Image (cartoon, rainbow, N blue to C red):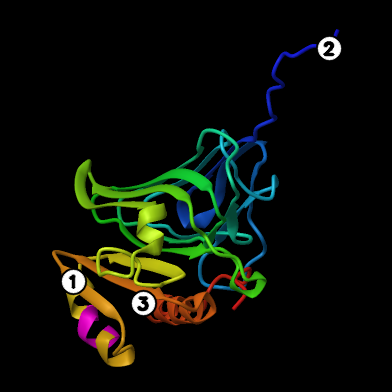
Amino acid sequence: MLDATPIALQRTRGTAAIGFGPGGRLAWLYQQGSAKVMVPRSHGATPEAVFLNTAGGLTGGDRLSLSVDIAPGTHITATTQTAERAYASAGGVAEVDVTLRIGPGARLDWLPQETILFDSAALHRTTRIELAEGANCLFAEMLTLGRQAMGETVRSLDLLDRRIVTRAGVPLLVEPLRLTGLDLVSRSPAGLCGARALATIALVTPDAEDRLPGLRRAFPDATASAWDGRLVCRAMSPDPHRLRRDVAAIVEYLRGAALPRVWQI
C-alpha cells in the first residue's frame, strides 16, 4: 500500500551578520545556512560587506536574515553579490529580515542589487535602518518584474516590502510597499502604469535639502523631494536595464564615489 503522507518541501534558512569596529576593522562575523557575507579586498575609500544567498533565490517558506553593525565614526558600504530572485511560491511566503545598526557619527551605504520578482512570487521583506545620533545613511532598492530578455510577464504577485529608518528610536522614514496582481495589470496612476521596474533611493543626512537642487540639475527627469534631513528619489520604467543605469548614476552622484565593484551595469 502506498504511503499518502504529504512530503514536506525543503526550505532555505540563512543568517548572516557582520560587525565593523573603529576604522572599519572587522569586529565579528557570523553566517549560517544559505546566507553568506564576505569582506573583499577593496581599493575604495570605504570597506565593503557583500552578502550572498547561496540557495540561488527565494520561494515560499524560505527565511533569510541579514544584519550589519557599525561602530561610531565609521563609513561602510554593504551590498549583495548579485540580484536576489523571488521565484513562484508553491505555498507560503518567503520572509527576509534586514537590520542595519549605525553608530554615532557613522555612515552606511546600503546598496543591494535589484530583486527580480517572478510570476506568482510571494515575498515579505522588512529592512530596518537604526541610526544613532549623528549617524547618516544612503540606501537604494530596486524591484524588477520578471526578466525582460526572457519575455517573462508577472501576472500574479504577493509583495510586501517595508523600509523603516529610525534615529535614536524615532521614525524618520517609513515606507511600506504592497504589490498584488491587481497593481500589475492596472495602467492607472494607482497602479504601475505598465512599468516593469521601480526604485527608491534615500539619503538621510543633515544637508539632504541642500543636495536636492544639484540632483535635479544633474538628473532633470528624476522625481525627488527633500525635507528635515531626508532626500528621497523614486523612479519607474518599462525598461529595467535603463532604470538600473539611472539608479547607478544617481547613487554615484549622491555618494560621491563609484558603485561597489560587484555591481554589473
Quarter that holds the C terminus: bottom right
What kind of element bears circle 2? Answer: loop
Amino acid type for the residue under numbered disc 2:
Leu
Residue 70: tell me if it is visible: no
Q: Is residue 199 above or below residue 249?
A: above
Query: Label 1 crowding class (10 Å Cα cut-off): few <14, some 14-19, many 20+?
Result: some
What is the crowding at mark 3: few (fewer than 14 residues within 10 Å), some, or many (at least 20)?
A: some
Q: Which residue is located at x 50 percent, y 65 percent? A: 144
Residue 68, x across and y down, in percent: 47, 46
Q: Which residue is mark 3?
A: 254
Inspect the image, locate mark 3, and give the three-letter code of the amino acid beneath it. Answer: Leu
Tell whether position 20 is magenta: no
Q: Is residue 87 left or right of residue 192?
A: right
In this view, the residue in front, 88 or 128, is 88
Query: Is 170 situated left or right of 8 in this image?
Result: left
Query: Which of labels 3 and 1 is toward the front?
Result: 1
Segment colored magenta: 211-215
Mark 2 or mark 3, which is nearer the start of the sequence? 2
Please identify the residue farthest to the right as the structure is shown: 1
In the rendered image, the vertical position of residue 129 relative to residue 196, given as above or below: above
What's the residue at 59%, 61% (across, down)? 83
Q: Residue 50 location, x and y as percent? A: 60, 56
Question: Which residue position holds label 2?
Answer: 2
For disc 1, the marked residue is: 226
Report the quarter where the N terminus lies.
top right
